[in-house]
Amino acid sequence: MSSGADPTRGPDDGGWTRRRFVGALTGVAAVATVAAPAAPGPSAVPSGAVPPTAGPSESASGPPVGGSEPRPLFVGTYASVQGGGKGIGLATYDPESGRVTGTGAVVTGVGDPSYLAPHPNGGTLYAVDEREAGAVTAVRLADDKVLGTRSTGGASPCHLSVHPGGRWLLSANYGSGSVAVHPIDASGALGERTTLVTHSSPAPGPGQQGPHAHQFVTSPDGGHVLAVDLGTDTVYTYLLDESRGTLTAVSQAHTRPGAGPRHLTFHPGGRFAYLANEVDNTVAVCAYDPATGRLTPGDPQPTGTGAGTSYPAQILVTSTGSYAYLANRGHNSLTRYAVEAAGARLRLLDTVPVGGDFPRQIAFSPDERLLFTANQRSGTVSVFHVDGDSGELLLAGEPFASPVAVCAVPL
């Protein structure tokens, strides 16, 4: 494998399969501070579910706490791998203790639901089907009924998000390096695709054989949508026509060659964003201009996982803009950063073991008092208590067992 190759992808693109990647790296925490460039100018078993034997197993994530109502937790998986799940796993969690309990049910009808995203109104859950003939599926949460599936027009979609207006679904096709837009009707169901854009330039980065769109999200201003492409070392900014669902290219932000950008998250102030680079094991603070949609990456900085690469997966920032957390798959840890200078700087604080293997995705509970990690290789979901003042993480007991857990969405 060449040094620039993405080790978690399929053999058809020259890398290892993202589903079967094995091997872990270890490292020693480091401390570094890197500033961004200056900011630019101004329930019961539902219909569609399978019996309890196919669902995630039950385990505890800490002692139960009286008086707190359980909340829903949805777990994405791969069904087409040995030991994988049967669909979207259904569980609940206690918002005080972090304890997770399996319901014994699974929503079927999605082949490989490796990434999930809820509608802003909480009525619908959307899932990718990460297969060669890529698709996206809508699930009504009132009864967990599948509302239908639409083609993404590309291969192996690995990410999706809902535009804040609630009318458009954005998805990223990793295998074909393209992004798609689907309309969402009043029921939450999806219409036929309105747009498909393939990243044809620049040329692929070192070790890559084509574009690999990994994420498609909306900026805080709502006026622009950004696509992170690991294969071309580029973040593409588009304008979304909210009446027609079409995309107009605005700008491109380039990382250093071979960085392999994977996941972007914005500071709540809207002028900075944080980019996790999977292949070269770095993060970068990016300046963002809401008026133009232009993103300007700063210098890459360490993840605190030591030498080599640890395949950073996802980065989150708190709604207060005080702390950021990075999931490191090889190191099996979460890196904690202090966010300083109104979002312009990340200061590495420490790394915390996730208590599982290969943390593929992380998510906050709605109140941000808990942080969930989906650990792909151990088939577990870990839950952490988040200290609102210090940002410190405390593991909330034993992880919850769920087959090939690649995404956990707490509502």
Image (cartoon, grey):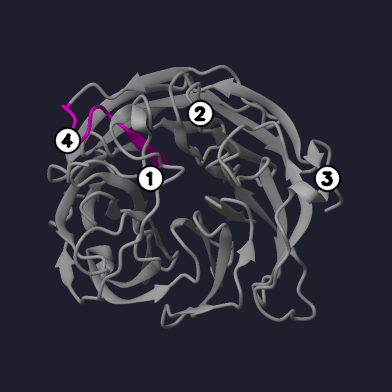
> As shown in the figure, which amino acid type bears the numbered disc 3?
Pro
Q: What's the CA distance linking mark 4 and mark 2?
A: 24 Å
Q: Label 3: which residue?
A: 51
Quadrant of the rendering where the N terminus is positioned: top left
**x and y, in percent, of residue 96 in the image:** 67, 76
Within 10 angstroms of label 2, few (less than 14), some, or many (20 or more) residues?
Answer: many
Label 3: how many Cα within 10 Å (few below 14, some 14–19, many 20+): few
- Viewer-nearest of discs 3 and 4: 3
Q: Which residue is mark 2?
A: 131
Q: In the displayed structure, would residue 383 be above or below residue 45?
A: below
Q: Secondary structure at mark 4?
A: loop
Question: Which label sits in the foreground, 1 or 4?
Answer: 4
Residue occupying the point 22% across, 58% down: 282
Q: Look at the numbered disc 3 and give the secondary structure of its residue.
A: loop
Q: Disc 1 versus disc 2: distance between alpha carbons?
A: 32 Å
Q: Position of residue 75 (x, y in %)?
A: 62, 51
The residue to which callout 1 is attached is 221
Residue span colored magenta? 202-223
Can see residue 321?
no
Question: Which sits earlier in the primary sequence, circle 4 or circle 2?
Answer: 2
Image: 123 above or below 337: above
Q: Which residue is mark 4?
A: 205
